[in-house]
Amino acid sequence: MEEVTVKTWEEFEERIKELESRKYDVLFRGQANSNWKLETTLDRFVFPESKLMDYYRIIYLAKPRIEAFIDKSWNIPSPKEYAKWLKERRGFLFLSDMPGYDYMAYLRHHGFPSPLLDWTSSPYIAAFFAYNRIDKSVENVSIYVFQEHIGLGKIATSQEPFISSFGDYVSTHKRHFLQQSQYTICTLKKDNDWYFAHHEDVAGRDKKQDLLWKFNIPSAERIKVLRMLDRFNINSFSLFGSEESLMDMIATKELLIKNIDLTNKSGSLGWFNRSEHLEHLGVFILEGGEKVAS
């Protein structure tokens, strides 16, 4: 993996233009802290190298409980059929062939620990996820750039981790399409059993496939970047479409992008009444300028 620290957002854009000028597709992933690793939610939830069979058995047993509460169902193989499918695989797995992929994507979008690592085909959507919610102590955010291969296809070797991607052709939540999402999965066959592996263990091993760049960008660029993205209609509401995201979009635009000083004791915020405006956002100001949420 090549790690690059840039000084400005504009410098990042120039570097991205160079990568996108190649004729092969690239994917982007934004993270709100450059110290965070490139991990799936399953990586963070359980110990590494979980078995595919164990994970599939868990999500298969969870399916009836999920279907009982939503107007949706999935026709996926039984654990016995899935075990047979795994046994027939050779040195690598392709995500596009994986049984229950639509169901796994649904679980990922609704917060269940997942081996799917989500990316976007837009560097600007990745920038939104990097900058929208960051801690004040963070010096840099990061945007990862992934290129699966250069050439006609990929070469895989048994006993080594393998990354597979799948495009946006999946039946799942509308956020998948709003966010221009794509997914990758990293697997490893070891001792005749299949395990999930870490993406960073694979990236950069070969100069013609699984190429990965990590760009660190100053968190100080946040307001400038969010203001630019809002002009492109890239914000919480456009990417999630929920009532909660609508509140987040309004709060971000009015309190952050417009750079309103809530500690201004004059009470004047220009064209609207400060108290009424904040009340609509569920925010109240106490004496001394302290801010609390309702």
Image (tube, rainbow, N blue to C red):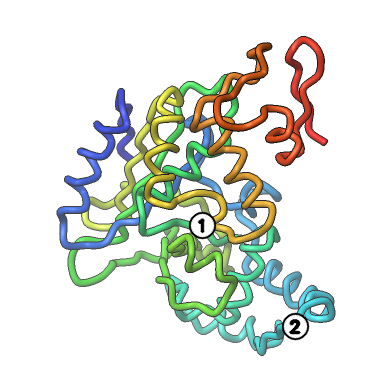
Are there few (<14), some (14-19), or many (20+) residues within 10 Å of tag 2?
A: few
Image point 43% across, 52% down: which residue? 233
Q: Which residue is mark 2?
A: 71
Q: Position of residue 115 (x, y in %)?
A: 58, 60
Which of the 4 image quadrants contains residue 9? top left
Image quadrant occupied by the C terminus: top right
Q: Position of residue 155 (x, y in %)?
A: 28, 67
**Amino acid type, residue under disc 2 in the picture:** Asp
- For the residues marked 1 and 2, what is the alpha-carbon distance in whole angstroms? 24 Å
263 relative to 53, above or below: above
Q: Nearer the viewer, mark 1 or mark 2?
A: 1
Characterize the local packing of mark 1: few (<14), some (14-19) or many (20 or more) Cα atoms within 10 angstroms. some
- Quarter occupied by residue 12: top left
x then y, percent, for residue 257: 49, 32
Looking at the rendered structure, the secondary structure element under dot 2 is loop
Q: Relative to 2, does residue 88 appear above or below in the rendering?
A: below
- Depth check, front residue: 120 or 89: 120
Q: Which residue is mark 1?
A: 238
Please name the amino acid that badge 1 sits on: Ser
Q: Tell me: 126 left or right of 113.
A: left
Residue 141 placement (x, y as % from top left): 46, 32
